[in-house]
Amino acid sequence: MYLYLIRHGIAIDPDPLTLDSIADDESRPLTKIGRKKIAQVADCLKQIHSHKGARLGLTFDLIITSPLIRAKQTADIFIDKQVSPKLEIAQDLKPMGNLPAWLMNWNARSDRNSISTLAIVGHEPNLSEWTELLLFGKVSHQLILKKGGMIGLKFPGNQIEIGTAQLYCLIPPKYLS
Amino acid sequence: MYLYLIRHGIAIDPDPLTLDSIADDESRPLTKIGRKKIAQVADCLKQIHSHKGARLGLTFDLIITSPLIRAKQTADIFIDKQVSPKLEIAQDLKPMGNLPAWLMNWNARSDRNSISTLAIVGHEPNLSEWTELLLFGKVSHQLILKKGGMIGLKFPGNQIEIGTAQLYCLIPPKYLS
């Protein structure tokens, strides 16, 4: 199966007077440019062609997002653009989220076999750290994932297990428009 | 500095009757579709825009290619498309090439400081193995690099040293058109 890890788009900066407020951070929305860029990314994924010119299009069977506003708004744009028919929210995808807990939930799902292309929308440094864990079993902070960027991992079966992935793509947002 | 590793485009298949002939393998040209796809990749790199719509364009100060026909033809298309002003050939970039030897030559060059964006055109599994070496100091075969695909590495200074890179991008060719 394929797992895509997508970082939310550009959001309004934290208010310096309330920088310590978790509630404030969780409710920061995307900026106008952030929304526009994510819409371009979604359009780009749907337009992908093979080297022979056949339209492939990348769509996801399911998107699971962090509940934070900037991530949820990013995922909503992908749903509006019909890049995926289905959206779920997972608390484990919040900043400082819990990958092992999320993996345990995922691998226990009864509908898992019907999903071969899954996307999660979340935050840094989580997403690049989780990518390194899924690839190599350890974190070394050697990956750069910009806002609106996307990582694609390929797994040999339909389980998502640490240390079993191959890196299929890591695409900065400027290449997705 | 940035180092981009580009895999040659789709070439004609080896002749099964002369499969053991190194000379035959070295002279395999790109197919018509292979040339077209690499031209699309070159055009795509020149068209890259920022999230604010400013035209950035990715160009290389220098391209160094494997001497094999399919790699040289790939590099020639980048030169024809003015993605780089300058092309060199390096024997160490051949299949089964020698990364440490190439690195020693590179880091000893007197003009190295004038080159902040370098591309090399070569072969698999070399390019993905070298990427893992430059990132992590060891090879684990977890990266997928298709023909016409591109990896981008960022180094903290202007030396290319094993174990010092960050992965900036890994882009399959279907995202570069």
Image (spheres, coloured by chain):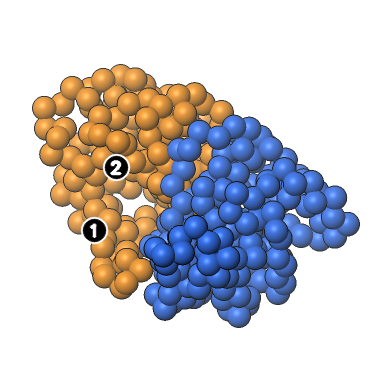
Chain colours: A blue, B orange
Q: Residue at x 51, y 30 (%)?
A: B19
- Quick one: label 2, few (<14), some, or many (20+) residues within 10 Å? many
Q: Secondary structure at mark 1?
A: loop
Regarding residue A2, the answer to whether it shows in the image is yes
- Along the line of sight, which residue is nearer the eye, A51 or A173? A173
Tag shown at residue B2: 2
In the displayed structure image, the side of residue B139 where residue A62 appears, left or right: right
Instruction: Work out whether A165 lies above or below B92.
Output: below
Q: CA distance from mark 2 to mark 1?
A: 20 Å
Q: Chain of mark 2?
A: B
From the viewer's perspective, is residue A75 above or below residue B75? below
Q: Contact (CB < 8 A) between labels 2 and 1?
A: no
Residue B92 at x, y = what percent? Answer: 32, 25
Given the image, on which type of amino acid does mark 2 rest? Tyr
Residue B89 seen in this snapshot: no
Residue that numbered label 1 is attached to: B81
Q: Quadrant of residue A34?
A: bottom left
Chain of the residue under label 1: B
Secondary structure beneath dot 2 equals: strand
At label 1, the amino acid type is Lys
In the rendered picture of this protein, how many numbered marks are placed on residues? 2
Residue A79 drawn at (x, y percent): 63, 75
Report the quarter where the C terminus of chain A lies. bottom left
Rendered residue at 39%/63% (across/down) = A16
Q: Residues within 10 Å of mark 1 (few under 14, many from 20)?
A: some
